[in-house]
Amino acid sequence: MPAFMIVGHDVANSTELRQQTRPEHVARLKQLAAEGRIILAGPTPIEHGAEAMSGSLIVAEFDSLQAAQDWANEEPYLKAGVYSHVDIRPFVQVLP
């Protein structure tokens, strides 16, 4: 199954809304992990040690670019307004 990277871009001052929406966001990631499809996922802080985030990176396997887009369209952070938008690109894992 091909891999895709999904980059979510936070809106300004997203910290509180991000914290409120996090349980639903993490539940979806755990579902991908349970299916053996997640390669990596995590937030992108504005700077290390900062509470404020600039977004998130998710690399996971999907059947197609459209399937990755469909999954991202249902992302709780996007639907709640934490993300202004997401970028999705094919991803080829070379290492490890």
Image: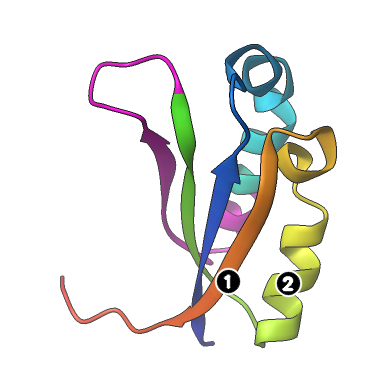
Q: Quadrant of the N terminus?
A: bottom right
Q: Is residue 69 magenta?
A: no
Q: Is residue 48 above or below residue 28?
A: above
Residue at (67%, 41%) from the top-left corner? 83
Q: Quadrant of the C terminus?
A: bottom left
- Of all residues, the one furthest to the left in this rendering is 96
* Amino acid under disc 1: Ile
Q: Nearer the viewer, residue 22 or 48?
A: 48
Secondary structure of the residue carrying numbered label 1: strand
Q: Is residue 38 magenta?
A: yes
Q: Is residue 94 left or right of residue 84?
A: left
Q: Is residue 80 left or right of residue 38?
A: right
Residue tagged by mark 1? 88
Q: Residues within 10 Å of mark 2 (few under 14, many from 20)?
A: some
User: Residue 34 appears at what percent x and percent y?
Assistant: 58, 53
Please provide the residue range marked out in magenta.
31-52
Q: Are marks 1 and 2 in contact (CB under 8 Å)?
A: yes
* Amino acid under disc 2: Gln
Which quadrant would residue 87 be assigned to in this image?
Answer: bottom right
Secondary structure of the residue carrying numbered label 2: helix
How far apart are the alpha carbons under marks 1 and 2? 7 Å
Which quadrant would residue 64 be assigned to in this image?
Answer: bottom right
Residue at (45%, 28%) from the top-left corner? 53
The numbered dot on residue 69 is 2
Q: Is residue 16 above or below residue 18?
A: above
Q: Nearer the viewer, residue 22 or 83?
A: 83
Residue at (65%, 25%) from the top-left corner? 22
User: Residue 7 appears at what percent x and percent y?
Assistant: 52, 57
The numbered dot on residue 22 is none
Residue at (34%, 84%) from the top-left corner? 92
Q: Nearer the viewer, residue 5 or 30?
A: 5
